Image (cartoon, rainbow, N blue to C red):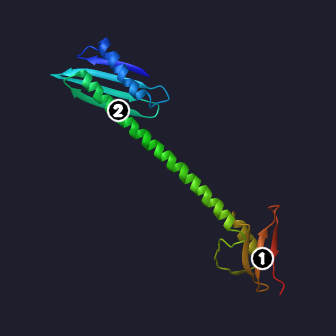
Amino acid sequence: MNIKITGKDLKATEAIKDYTQKKLERIQKYFDEDFDVNVTIKAEKNMQIAEMHVITRTNTYRAVTEHKDLYASIDKNIDILEGQIRKAKTRRDRVNKEDSIKVKENAEFLTERKNELTDEILKTLYYEIKPIAPEDAKLKLEEKKGNNFLTFINVDTGKVNVIFKLKDGKNYGIVEPEA
């Protein structure tokens, strides 16, 4: 914990520095990593104002209070900062817990779905089949880069045929019914 105390219109005495450092130890328990604290104390009319900024790697917390007694103002800031830090930590823990539960539930759901769906028709596509020549079907299949096959009615035979790309990626095959 790195503490920087600045006084405006008010001198930051050793007693104030020691008191502030002692009170900030309450906040230190919430952080694993090192963090910075900027404390500004000032006097306006008959009020003592303490402003504290706690800067961590991920968040910044701020509290400003005024009181007739500077020590009371510092105490109030510590209470405010502790509340902000606890609230942020609770929120972060809740989000992390919910995310882990959601991931676990999704994994369980997918495992169940894999186990229960075997040998099932999962998707049906509908499209219009036009009578065309096998050479035209080959050209049409070449146009559609993502498709590996095309169903068509052969103009010569009047039967439904399927043209498909062979594994070599250069040649084609045709499936034609016998009867």
Q: Position of residue 147 (x, y in %)?
A: 70, 66
Is residue 135 shown above or below 98?
below
* Label 1 – label 2 distance at C-alpha: 77 Å
- Circle 2 packing at 10 Å, graded few (<14), some (14-19), many (20+), is many
Q: Amino acid at mark 2?
A: Leu
The quadrant in which residue 59 appears is: top left
- In the rendered structure, the answer to whether residue 120 lies left or right of residue 106 reads right
- Any mark on residue 134, and which? 1
Query: Mark 1 or mark 2, which is nearer to you?
Result: 2
- Which sits in the foreground, 69 or 3? 69
Image quadrant where one finds the C terminus: bottom right
At x 39%, y 35%, the residue is 85
The quadrant in which residue 55 appears is: top left
The local secondary structure at tag 1 comes to: helix
Q: Position of residue 116 (x, y in %)?
A: 67, 67
At x 64%, y 62%, the residue is 112
> Where does label 2 land, which residue?
81
Q: Earlier in the sequence, mark 1 or mark 2?
A: 2
Image quadrant where one finds the N terminus: top left
- Circle 1 packing at 10 Å, graded few (<14), some (14-19), many (20+), is some
- In the rendered structure, the answer to whether residue 33 lies left or right of residue 160 reads left
**Circles 1 and 2 in contact, beta carbons < 8 Å:** no
Q: Residue furthest top?
A: 14
- In the rendered structure, the answer to whether residue 81 lies left or right of residue 155 reads left
The quadrant in which residue 66 appears is: top left
